[in-house]
Image (cartoon, rainbow, N blue to C red):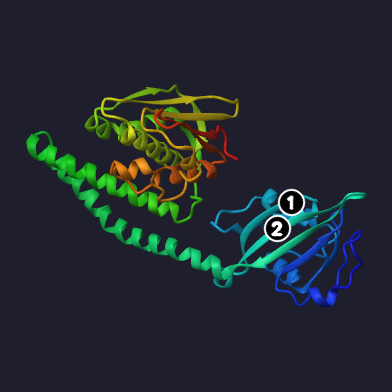
Amino acid sequence: MGAPPVGGFPVDAGFLDHLDTGIAIFDPAGRLRAANAAAHRFARLQGVDLHDADLARSLREGPHGYDIDDAPLRVEQSVILAAAQGREAQRTVWAGPVDRRRALRKSSHRIVSATDGLEGTALLTRDVSRRAHHDRLPHDLLASTSHELRNPLTPIVGHLELLSDDLGDGDETASARLAILRRNVDRVVRRLDELLLLEHLAPRLVMAECDAASVVAAAVAARAEDARAREVRILLDVAPTTIVADAERLQMAVDALVGNAVRFSPRGGTVTVALTSGAADRVEIVVIDEGPGFRPTELAHVFEPFHRGRDARASAVPGLGLGLAVSRAIAHTHGGAIDIVSEPGAGAVVMLTVPVSAR
């Protein structure tokens, strides 16, 4: 490693080369001053040469890899670039060939002195593959189980549609029973689609121009029967708004929010669903319910997959606790956000925001 120290930061080449943790030191101008063997090894797995004289440019132009959730990384998410630019950041990423990839926990830390200010940045890299693969096991089991359950449902849905066409309007009793079958099969299909989406917590999107109002209205229509069963009124306030989005995924996100609102609303209550253009480049979908609301301690966990609040468990409200996690994953992958404002006993206001144009 044998490079001069950064300011007063001493570097012992022989000692650091025996460490499993990668350590690289950049000066304030972004030049590599020192790096141990592990730092170079980990960087090569990402296709990066730490000795590159124009490292920042190469990082901007080169492949950016994938984060631990298999979502493609953007250039501004590169921790190596952050270190070269004197910024602090941390992220776990996949690196290396697909069949031998490693999970790397990377972090950059500014080295600051009281007298001279920024003296450099330390880039630390640890191999956390064992833990990452262990953490993936539940997701892989969930994914394989969901696929196995989803596949036989496809022909069932198709045959239900054929039966409905064959019956026509001739037998009202049979048609009503068939509608109940179809509604419940659709409910199972939705749950499995949510499970499959959460397999990647960063769903792949098919972006195209669509009318956000139609997307929201379709999600509300899909929950109309549930609302009638609970005697809940849904107020819809939308106007035609063209955006670039994955309409199917966005409808899934809104469907989950409306479903939660209906499920937790008191019998005879009202759910309001509105579409607004808050900022010039974004649209906001707002879902308001009159349910029990969230305690402050619950708000920190509501977006976790399979999280069910105390009121849901105490009231035996059906559900897997996936809706908000699914909605957040879809919003974030669109480059948007989701937020909740709620107090115990005062219902909840959920705001899902997405860009008007693709990122």
Picture residue at 23% right of the left edge, 45% below the top: 184
Side of 44 relative to 150 (left or right): right
Instruction: Tell me where residue 278 sits by quadrant.
Output: top right
The residue positioned 24% from the left and 27% from the top of the image is 231
In this view of the protein, which residue sits in the foreground, 266 or 351? 266
Location of the C terminus (image quadrant)? top right
Q: Secondary structure at mark 2?
A: strand
Q: How many marks?
A: 2
- The image's mark for residue 107 is 2
Q: Residues within 10 Å of mark 2 (few under 14, many from 20)?
A: many
Read off the residue under disc 1.
Answer: 88
Along the viewing direction, whichever of 9 and 257 lies nearer the viewer: 9
Residue 89 pos. (x, y %): 70, 52
Q: In this orientation, does residue 326 appear?
A: yes
Left or right, 336 with respect to 42, comes to left
Residue 166 lies, with reference to residue 45, above or below; the image says: above
Asked whether 33 or 207 is in front, the reply is: 33
Q: How would you rate the neighbour count of disc 1 (Cα within 10 Å): few for under 14, some for 14-19, many for 20 or more?
A: some
- Residue 307: x percent and y percent? 41, 48
Compute the Cα span from label 1 to label 2: 7 Å
**Left or right of 11: which side holds 344?**
left
| Relative side of 303 to 83, left or right | left
Q: Is the residue under label 2 in contact with that under label 1 (CB below 8 Å)?
A: yes
| One can see residue 214 in this view | no
Quadrant containing the N terminus is bottom right
Q: Position of residue 255 (x, y in %)?
A: 37, 37
Foreground: 112 or 141?
112
Amino acid carrying mark 2 in the image: Ser
Residue 67 against residue 299 in the figure, above or below: below
Q: Is residue 125 above or below residue 277?
A: below
